[in-house]
Amino acid sequence: PMLPDSLNFTLNESNEHSFVDLLLEDAGIGFEDDPAASSPAQKKSSLGTSNPSKSPSTKSRKINAFLEEQGMPLSICQLVTDLLQAERGNSFRSDTALLSLEEAIFDLKQMATHSQRYLQNGTCLRTTCEKTSLFNQVGDELHGREEEMSALMGMAERVSLHVRTPSMTCSYGGMHPGFSQVNNFICEAAFLSGHSGSGKSSIIKRLISFCKKGDWIVLMCKFDRQVAPLSALMQSIDACFGSFIPNKGQDGQYSPLNPMDQETFGRISRFMLTSIDNESLSQLCKLLPNFSKISPLLMNYPQKRERSGTVDDTLASITKASKRVSSPDGVGSGSNRLNYLFHIIFKALCSAGRPMALVLDDLQWSDEFTVDIIGDFLQTAGCSSDQFTEQESPHGGLLLVGSFRDNEVDADGFLMNQIKCMEQSKPNIKVKRISVGELQEHEINKMLSHKFCLPIRYTRELARLVYHKTRGNPMYVNEFLISIIQRKMLTFSVKAQRWTWDEDSIDFHMISKGVVELLTTKLQQLPCDVIKALKVASCFGQLNDSIIPLLDLGQFVPNMHEALRLAMDEGIVEKAGPLFAFSHDMLQESTYNLIPTHERKPLHKMIGKSLAQDADILNNAELCTLAADQINMCKDTEGMLDPSDQGLFCRLNLAAGKHSVAASSYEQAQGYFEAGISLLHDNPWEKQYYLSLELHEMSVIVSFMDGNVETVSSRLCEILSHSKSF
């Protein structure tokens, strides 16, 4: 909105009332000094309270009323009123008096930059709440993280420039610092560390959004304590390839790839198909179903289309390969082969002519093998080109971003040791550690100012209270604000068209001991069926749409889908494609902790048995492993599993182990085979001979492929001592 011409003025010392006079003259009104406004007995107002103890002077009130009549936004009315409060001769200024030029400029910049927020008066409570981004977990700005984002954006820019400009020069014209001229591949790695709820995932989401807008290849892997790390990484790679799959039209046919994606995936396909043999291609197509769906070049390589149709076919090829190895060097050959395949995949993605971002969230739940795969690739890919053939040498750049909870990682553990190795491999990799700490009071103040569309001088005292209650933990701050809104200590006044609050009530508000307790209180206020559905969901890492009908058969809640939809409305869970997941891992932990300790294992058993009702479960890799995982949660508790069910559970673990072997996850497979062996009846070689033999044989095979010699020896001895001839 444009101001009236009479409001264009110049302040000067000789006529300190000129601005006021011009305003009143334009309005056609006059004023007399208000004796009450200058009364010494009047108390100083308190910032941001819903009932300030001192009202503005008569001059300020008249000017404010005039501006409102002219249709000026509330933010402009506040600015002018606060400027008038700072007039010379006003001995009893309000706490909102604008005394700083910097604050005035900050207010004007906010209005110019976020005009939709600051220059539109709020009238609808729902719309105003949505503007705060407190309830939908989707904010339009990161507050107090400017330094961290600046560092990551700088790294992303350097990687992007290297890939998109063949000369490998930076914007300032010089050679990329820290990298050799002979390199055609660069990698920049950033590792974010901080406590749970410190905002690491929010920074990562902002970076991913930036990369996707810039046509990067983005591979996002979020590790989970309930999902095997290698499986999580493989699923993320498959999802990355799946992002190239075009949408289906109304006729059921896929629309063609756009030219850029077609060129990109063509390069990836050519690299992968010319770098691996038939056996590796078969394994790769099993590991990455989306790759085989969309590769435009597979038809050009008919000799490489020999694929194992079943899990048993894949196992037979692995067993055959292990029998061919007679030297001690063959021990662990399966893991080495898998490592090689991952290297080919990463090299192919980095050779696509587009910058690539590899994001690894919650690394504290990864394992040594998975972390070593990434580290080995980076340390070899960054070597000079004379160490690779022309085909193998990766062209391009990679931005690796990892995050982990620093209080859940050992200083001398595998993760920190791998980071140290990367740091020592310069100039191949440039590594930066970024500590994500708590928000400071002034950063919380800026955040509150932005969320509530108020000047920072209005929210300063509220920021002090929030910081005192939460100690600056970003997630705690968010949940605390939601809690005081729900308790009506912080409300939106339609009459005043702004957020108001009662500082005394907030100050006396009993704060929870931590964010977990606050989240628990929040969860307990949900409807009973929603809580039950969330408890079931918390037993999984992610919950796929396809298994919900089986959970409905277990009669946990009348309608699982509807309950999860209500949880989505509350911001507890979010949905990406067919997968439901908690919006933050702390919410999952808090929900799981709502289940009484003595009820947890029975719940896992009920979930496992519900999933096992599927007639084709043994051939369904995802369903079989999920059911086995749930059953294995309670297998060590005496009397928990019925003897009549143990045979089924043994076969479940056997099938789940086979699926894991087919996916080359040998450590996970070994866990299933060992679980199956532990569930066998007493004297199993007499009562369950064939099942016992197969479990022990599979344990030997995967132990050999994974390099576990001790288990190979012990299991072979057991087989030989009980084997029969028919």
Image (cartoon, helix red, strand yellow):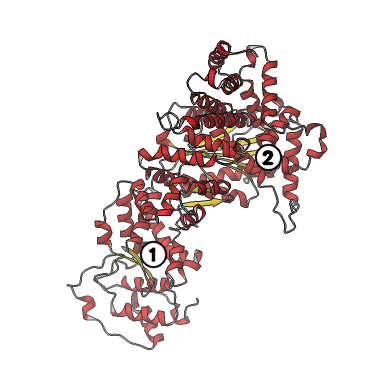
The answer to whether residue 293 is left or right of residue 623 is: right
Label 2: which residue?
Answer: 289
Q: Residue at x 75, y 57 (%)?
A: 251
Q: Place residue 586 in its image quadrant.
A: top left
Q: Secondary structure at mark 1?
A: loop
Question: Disc 1 vs disc 2: which is toward the camera?
Answer: 2
| Quadrant in the picture for residue 35 | bottom left
Q: Which residue is mark 1?
A: 455
**Image spot of residue 360 (x, y percent):** 54, 39
* Quadrant holding the C terminus: top right
Q: Residue furthest bottom?
A: 28
Task: Assess disc 2: are there few (<14), some (14-19) or many (≥20) residues with their C-alpha within 10 Å of its C-alpha.
Answer: some
Helix, strand or loop under label 2: helix
Query: How far from the left and from the top, in percent, is residue 722?
Result: 56, 13
Which one is nearer the viewer's eye here, 632 or 647? 647
Q: Amino acid at mark 1?
A: Pro
Alpha carbons under labels 1 and 2: distance apart: 53 Å
Q: Evaluate whether residue 141 shows in this view.
A: no
Q: Is residue 23 left or right of residue 37?
A: right
Q: Classify 10 Å Cα crowding around label 1: few (below 14), some (14-19), many (20 and above).
A: many
Considering depth in this image, is 46 or 23 the residue closer to the camera?
46
- Residue at image x 28%, y 77%? 57
Three-letter code, disc 2: Pro
Q: Is residue 723 above or below residue 414?
A: above
Residue depicted at x 42% and y 69%: 125
Residue 400 vertical placement versus 531 (above, below): above
Q: Are marks 1 and 2 in contact (CB under 8 Å)?
A: no
